[in-house]
DNA sequence: CCAGTATCCTGCAGGC
DNA sequence: TGCCTGCAGGATACTG
């Protein structure tokens, strides 16, 4: 469920609490995630190494190690990373991987729906990894406004579906695509190639703004979002339209509508968005 | 190449 | 109370 801001929030927490830690042990089960979890390979490569500065690319976390190699993590819809103090804490269901750290804490990967991913990337494998190689522009990249018109040019698919396509823009998910389109005043079902330059400029600005605000707020809380420290994210961004079918539009009081685009729920204002 | 749909999973809320 | 349905922050393998 995490989108870019949630993943970035986790990355920052890991920067504080995982950076510099050495892996002393690893537990896991060979469960089928998006790709099969290769426990043996993870253990062989991770035990004894030290975590360096964590990176993010789109919704992926890249946990680099010294002297080399990377633990690649994607949280899918329901994945969480938890940093747990002490190893006697009860292990909740769907904990697929646990890294025992040299300060007595434990990094756990929990993912009930198993759409997520945890995989070892050896030095150099990052470039050849299929899901990383195809990722599009980072939406916080200053070049986004210049690039967005080219990405959408000639496309007839709904602009919302295009925003969700990680090969075009990497890191935008259902919530922030929905919110950015509302802020920009663009109907989510409008064909991507039929939006004026000026309005695409506004979309790029609003997308950037909503992502930055969400990062500032430490992500968005829907139901069960939890920071890596295991605390509920209670200071999440206040959403304008997502999940508010039938509620009055915060801008014009018209009842918000729900429709389905690219198989995903979309919320929008018939009056504000054209 | 592009657009649209089905599918992988579990948990939970709401209706009856 | 229980059972059933639909829905969930994602990505990808298909089909036309």
Image (tube, coloured by chain):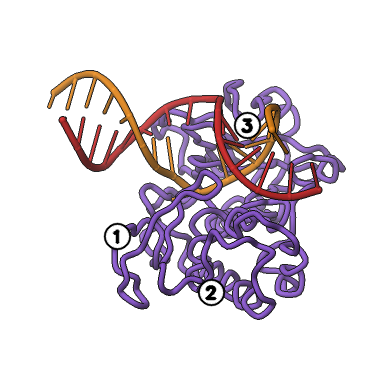
Chain colours: A purple, B red, C orange
User: Residue A257: where, in percent of width, then height?
Assistant: 37, 59
User: Residue A62: where, in percent of width, then height?
Assistant: 70, 48
Mark 2 highlights which residue?
A184
Dot in front, 3 or 1 = 1
Q: Nearer the viewer, residue A243 or A18?
A: A243
Compare marks 3 and 1 and give the one earlier in the sequence: 3
Mark 3 highlights which residue?
A34
- Mark 1 secondary-structure assignment: loop
Compare marks 1 and 2 and give the one earlier in the sequence: 2
Q: Estimate the spatial distance between the alpha carbons at disc 3 and disc 2, rounded to whole Å.
A: 34 Å
- Residues at discs 1 and 2 in contact (Cβ within 8 Å): no
User: Residue A167: where, in percent of width, then height?
Assistant: 73, 51
In the image, is A163 to the left or to the right of A232? right
Q: Quadrant of residue A44?
A: top right
Q: Nearer the viewer, residue A131 or A155?
A: A155
Q: Nearer the viewer, residue A95 or A16?
A: A95
- The chain containing the residue under callout 2 comes to A
Q: Estimate the spatial distance between the alpha carbons at disc 1 and disc 2, rounded to whole Å.
A: 20 Å
Compare marks 3 and 2 and give the one earlier in the sequence: 3
- The chain containing the residue under callout 3 comes to A
């Amino acid at each position: 469920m995490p989108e870019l801001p949630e993943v970035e929030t986790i990355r920052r927490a890991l920067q504080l609490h995982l950076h510099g830690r050495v892996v002393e042990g690893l537990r896991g089960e060979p469960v089928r995630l998006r790709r099969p979890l290769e426990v043996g390979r993870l253990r062989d490569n991770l035990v004894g190494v030290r975590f360096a500065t964590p990176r993010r690319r789109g919704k992926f976390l890249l946990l680099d190690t010294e002297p080399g190699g990377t633990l690649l993590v994607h949280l899918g819809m329901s994945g969480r990373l938890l940093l747990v103090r002490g190893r006697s804490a009860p292990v909740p269901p769907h904990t697929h991987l646990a890294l025992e750290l040299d300060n007595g804490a434990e990094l756990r990967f929990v993912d009930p729906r198993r759409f997520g991913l945890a995989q070892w990337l050896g030095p150099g494998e990052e470039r050849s990894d299929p899901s990383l190689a195809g990722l599009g522009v980072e939406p916080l990249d200053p070049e986004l406004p210049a690039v967005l018109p080219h990405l959408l040019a000639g496309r007839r698919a709904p602009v919302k579906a295009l925003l969700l396509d990680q090969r075009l823009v990497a890191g935008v998910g259902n919530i922030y695509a929905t919110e950015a389109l509302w802020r920009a005043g663009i109907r989510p079902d409008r064909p991507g190639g039929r939006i004026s330059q000026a309005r695409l400029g506004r979309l790029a600005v609003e997308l950037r703004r909503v992502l930055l605000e969400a990062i500032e707020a430490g992500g968005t809380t829907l139901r069960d979002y939890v920071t890596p420290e295991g605390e509920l994210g209670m200071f999440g961004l206040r959403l304008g339209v997502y999940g508010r079918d039938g509620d009055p539009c915060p801008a014009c009081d018209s009842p918000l509508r729900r429709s389905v685009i690219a198989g995903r729920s979309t919320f929008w204002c018939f009056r504000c968005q054209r």
